[in-house]
Image (tube, rainbow, N blue to C red):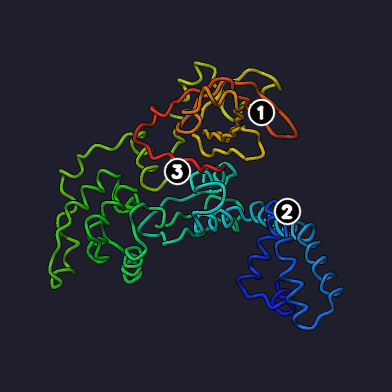
Amino acid sequence: MQIAMVAAGFTGGEADQLRRAMAAWKRKGGLEPFQDRLINGMLARGYDETFARQIYQQIKGFGEYGFPESHSASFALLAYVSSWLKCYYPATFVCALINSQPMGFYPPAQLVQDLRRHGVQVLPVDVTISQWDCSLEDDLAADNQEKKALRLGLRLVRGFSEKAAMRLIAARESQHFHNVADLVRRATLVQREADVLAAADALCSLATDRYRAFWDVSGVERVPALFESMAEDFGQDSPAMLMLPKPAEAQDILADYNHIGLSLRRHPLSLWRAHLSRYQVSTAAALATCADGDKVKTAGLVTCRQRPQTASGVTFLTLEDESGFVNVVVWSGLLERYDREVHEASVLGITGRLQHADGVTHVIATVLVDLSHWFAGMALKSRDFS
């Protein structure tokens, strides 16, 4: 690009077009459209024609070989560094990924599930501790004192703004919160901001559960500034509040997904595991013990859909259950029959043939069943690539 600008008089925009043509690697005509512009530009600046054509051939050669090679080298370095970080500093790695969302292949729910399966402690969003971003804390339960736990940040609370979070953190740093009312008043939260914190169970340190949190935020009275120092004594522990029922586990899990996009409680599929086991539906982990070619049944949340242009119409699905991930292959012929299930279902049951190849396990689907109704009302969303 620099040669084109200095030697041939390319503008910055023209040089960028040249770069894009090199990146296309012959798919869109290569560098031929730039040949005359390069050579004539160099001739106009006093360069010999033979030299100009040599420069063009060198640029063309780099576009055909050097550009893809340099990209592959860069990707290899990124893959190596990412793998090293994930291996030795898993909490740090996932913390950075979540704070950079949306990006990458997996959303926070899958990143957190994988992190926990690798033995790393993940701590909930908590208004008395959490920062805006996810952060690292000492894992007090670990034998290795250098091991870190991941604390989820307020950024995961859907509908809660960074501006509101900064007010909350500033109020917390000046003095710890005595109760929910104290937090709402000193952080100057409007009702909607307080409600989303309650819905996300982010008030867990100040209220026993979601229902109590909702009760507390709804009962906060706005008092004049003169009486703010006394506000913590106003109506927080009446017997009526203590009689509130606690939410059921399934209700908490559903609310977790709807308000922070993940849950640190049991995986949703585990709620149905007893039912699935009666129909010989295997977990992701159990598939690894099955033989190549076995007929299997499995089920999971649909976390990713891929249909690469080079795959001749084949669609690849990734399902997640409480034990891990399942790779599913849907051939183009089957897709015609199960188009809606493949493209719209948030939870799928799969019958198919197991395939072990090069250390990777796939299920070649033969039957797909939409089980989305099992989690009606739960915000489940996959990442789709085509």
Describe the element under mark 1 as helix, strand or loop. Answer: loop
- Amino acid type of disc 1? Ala
Q: Is residue 258 above or below residue 48?
A: above
Describe the element under mark 3 as helix, strand or loop. Answer: loop
> Where does the N terminus fall, quadrant-wise?
bottom right
- Please identify, in this view, whether the residue under mark 2 or under mark 3 is nearer the observer: 2
- Amino acid type of disc 2? Lys
Count of number-bearing discs: 3
**Disc 1 to disc 3, how far (Cα)?**
25 Å
Q: Residue at x 32, y 72 (%)?
A: 174
**Which is more toward the observer, 134 or 348?**
348
**Disc 2 to disc 3, how far (Cα)?**
48 Å
Q: Residue at x 34, y 41 (%)?
A: 255
- Amino acid type of disc 3? Leu
Q: Which residue is mark 2?
A: 26
Q: Which mark is residue 233?
A: none
Horizontal and vertical percent for residue 168? 32, 64
Dot 2: within a 10 Å radius of its alpha carbon, few (fewer than 14), some, or many (20 or more) residues? few
Q: Which residue is mark 1?
A: 288
Q: Which residue is mark 3?
A: 264
**Disc 1 to disc 2, how far (Cα)?**
42 Å
Q: Is residue 228 above or below residue 161?
A: below
